[in-house]
Image (cartoon, rainbow, N blue to C red):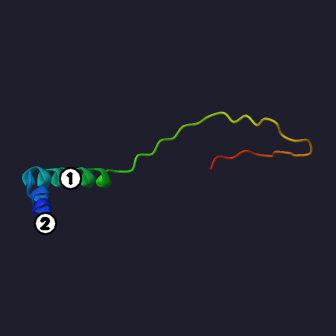
């Protein structure tokens, strides 16, 4: 049992500091605004089977 206690208490200040840094990083990432990227591209429809008619291609 002493070995587990030694592992937990060894460099305790660094472990607490790393938890604090991880929490602050998580807080920063989750609180930022969501970024939205928008781009336009040409749509080419290939290999359409005979008898199939595509009337319109609309973006989502």
Front residue of this view, candidates 44 and 1 = 1
Question: Residue visible at 64% across and 46% down?
Answer: 59
Question: Residue visible at 11% across and 49% down?
Answer: 14
Left or right of 42, for residue 47: right
Q: Position of residue 46 (x, y in %)?
A: 78, 35
Q: Quadrant location of the N terminus?
A: bottom left
The residue pinned by badge 2 equals 1
Front residue of this view, candidates 14 and 39 = 14
User: Furthest-right residue in view?
Assistant: 51
In the structure shown, which secondary structural element does the residue marked by tag 2 occupy?
loop
Q: Position of residue 56 (x, y in %)?
A: 76, 46
Q: Position of residue 6 (x, y in %)?
A: 9, 58
The residue pinned by badge 1 equals 24
Q: Which mark is residue 49?
A: none
The answer to whether mark 1 and mark 2 are in CB contact below 8 A is no
* Crowdedness near tag 1: few (<14), some (14–19) or many (≥20) residues, C-alpha within 10 Å: few
Q: How many angstroms separate mark 1 from mark 2 (CA)?
A: 33 Å
């Amino acid at each position: 049992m002493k070995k587990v206690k030694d592992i937990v208490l060894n460099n305790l200040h660094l472990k607490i500091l790393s938890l604090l840094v991880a929490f602050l990083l998580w807080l920063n990432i989750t609180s930022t605004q969501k970024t939205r990227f928008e781009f336009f591209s040409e749509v080419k429809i290939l290999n359409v089977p005979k008898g199939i008619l595509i009337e319109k291609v609309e973006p989502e």
